Amino acid sequence: MKAEVKWIEDLKFVGKTDKNQEIIMASGDSTYFSPMEMVLMAAGGCSSVDVVDSLKSAGQKIESCIAKLTAERRETAPKLFTEMNIHFELKGDQLNADKIEKAVSDSLEKYCSVCLMLGAGVKMTHSWSIV
């Protein structure tokens, strides 16, 4: 895996992957994602992959999965995340609560690379609901 980040102007940068995909990020400009917002979304995306894959593998008929993330950060620099919660809103046909709890817990504790990297310094929690 490779990527590059190129300074555009002010505190605006363009990130580009080796798949030639680009995203603009900036600090202090609400028009673009901040790098920390991207980390937050990466945790939600990575964990969602685990949850959906696990539920499908367990024979669950999942129709939708929305990960809603909240995070707290330190007040002073470096403004690290101190707490993060991922709340999964799941929809499907006769979803099993035990299988959901296992999928969500396993993602946070065993499989989600992003969450596991953050977990050493961030209080990571999860919750879920069937909608």
Image (spheres, helix red, strand yellow):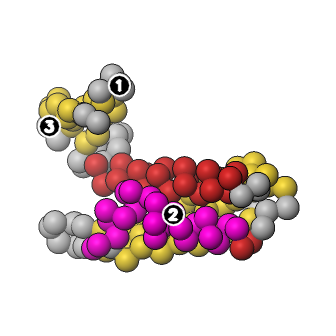
Quadrant of residue 8 within the rendered picture: top left
Quadrant of residue 124 within the rendered picture: bottom left
The residue tagged 1 is 19
Quarter of the rendering occupied by the N terminus: top left
Q: Nearer the viewer, mark 1 or mark 3?
A: 1
- Three-letter code, disc 2: Ser
**Could you classify mark 2 by the number of other residues whose Cα lies within 10 Å: few (under 14), some (14-19), or many (20 or more)?**
many
Q: Earlier in the sequence, mark 2 or mark 1?
A: 1
Query: Residue 107 got which mark?
Result: 2
Horizontal side of 46 relative to 91 (left or right) equals left
Horizontal side of 73 relative to 53 (left or right) equals left
The residue tagged 3 is 10
- Three-letter code, disc 3: Asp
Which residue is at the far right?
94
Tell me, yes or no, if residue 69 can be seen here: no
Tally of numbered tags: 3
Mark 2 in CB contact with mark 1 (< 8 angstroms): no
Q: Which residues are magenta?
A: 99-121
